[in-house]
Image (spheres, rainbow, N blue to C red):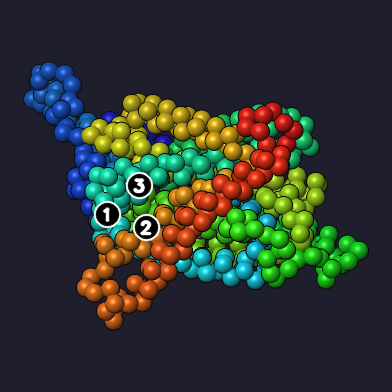
Amino acid sequence: MADDGHSILAPVSAASQPLAHKNHVGTTSRAKSSGATTPPLGSLAVGVADKDDSGETSEELSQDRLKQIAAAGNAHFHRLGWKRLAIVTIVEAVALGALSLPAAFHTLGMFAGVFLTITLGLIAIFTSYLVGQVKLKFPETSSYADAGKLLLGRFGYELFGAALVLELVMVVGSHALTGSIALGTLSDGHGCSIVFSAVSAIILLILAIPPSFTEVAVLGYVDFGSIVAAVAITLIATGIQANDSAVGLGGIDWSAWPREGVTFSQAFVAVSNIIFAFSFAIGQFSFMDEMHTPTDYMKSIWASGFIQIIIYALTGALCYAFVGSSVKAPALLSAGPTISKAAFGVALPVIFISGSINSTVALRYLHGRMFKNSVARYINTPMGWTTWIGLVIAFTLVAWVIAEAVPIFSDLLSLASALFVSGFSFWIPAIMWFKLLCRGSWYSKENLLTSIASIVAFIVGAVTLVAGTYSTIVDIIQETAQGSAHSPFACRSP
């Protein structure tokens, strides 16, 4: 997929050389500071030191070849602009988030739903600003694992890396589950859900093969148009149905306050689903690592953050207002069989493209870690492509198993949110401010506002971590005991 894909021996164009330097550091300095150093070229050279007609030894020729591969690979992975980054961050989070919000609004009530969506969205924009500042101050930080190393040393690197992979594999699994629901709806319930989820996993696998976010961003435009169209179809259809109903729009049983009899665990599962909707910070280090001008990152954060807030607030509020207490999760099921089929058909690209982006974030970290001292990490050699595709297959298989083991849409989302997004999007960036970014006293005039906002973000994340995890586990146990949860790996009609 690299620009030089026709030949790994092709000379690197002059235009590609300054590209790496535009991203603050060149190939060597960037890799050296991140720990993923460019391998000693002499150690990778092959053959004996025979001279050719030009007087160069085979070792020198091998070193030249490795330099070309490394330079071309580095240039290929630094082509992302802020507009495409905005699209990538939107589609990474918006799909499953938008689909789960109307049901969350029903649990929490209209007022709390809208208030939390706007407030948590603004906090997520702020914490993404902090993440970007860490990336600019420490340009060698290419993933959340590297950020963990800055905070806690080697232990932090391992801990954050494991959390990153676990979070993203759960997200991809939930996309496989949503794909199963979509395909089951399109088939009128004829077929086995485990087959549909397997088909979804295969599609996710194929779309995760391109390793560059610049390439994925092209599909992101299709993804974004897909979710907007699917949500629009659902809202228009439910609005017309509500208006034509016997009670009319004024008779729909929505409420500004939490529904009667709602338990703490049910309420916090709903809150966790809103938090999950703003999970774009998890991939921000990886995304910014591909930018040709990283200082432009806040343009993409402002754009994607406000677009997400608007989509989520309108989708959650309008769908709940049009459908009322019978609203379902995912929201596309709320419009009736015929409209749901049309909406799911339009939404198929977003279900699969968004899921594949999360695979790419996790696998770029894993692949770069495995081959940090080899040019295979640039994924423009036979070894690079073979190992990359192998990781894509293994990762997607694990995600599919999770989707079948916990086939409860909202709870799968909220479990991932409580365990991981609470940290990546809220309390960890707050700690980064105090430990890595704050200069001088935290309560000084120039730092006080940012420090207060960071404390709020930390509290939101910490409460979500504890209460959200507890509530989700309780909810799963209750639904399983009541028989409302599907049995794992059961072949059932969707």
The amino acid marked with disc number 3 is: Phe
Asked if labels 1 and 2 touch by Cβ distance under 8 angstroms, the answer is yes
Q: Residue at x 58, y 58 (%)?
A: 268
Q: Position of residue 395 (x, y in %)?
A: 46, 33
Q: Position of residue 258 (x, y in %)?
A: 68, 66
Q: Is residue 218 visible?
A: no
Q: Secondary structure at mark 1?
A: helix
Neighbor class of circle 2 (other Cα within 10 Å; few <14, some 14-19, many 20+) is: many
Alpha carbons under labels 2 and 1: distance apart: 10 Å
Neighbor class of circle 3 (other Cα within 10 Å; few <14, some 14-19, many 20+) is: many
Q: Position of residue 98 (x, y in %)?
A: 61, 56
The amino acid marked with disc number 1 is: Leu
Residue denoted by label 2 = 428
- Indicate the quadrant where residue 353 lies: top right
- Indicate the quadrant where residue 4 lies: top left
Query: Above or below — where is 9 with respect to 446?
Result: above
4 lies left or right of 240:
left
Alpha carbons under labels 3 and 2: distance apart: 10 Å
User: Observer-nearest residue: 150 or 93?
Assistant: 150
Residue denoted by label 1 = 151
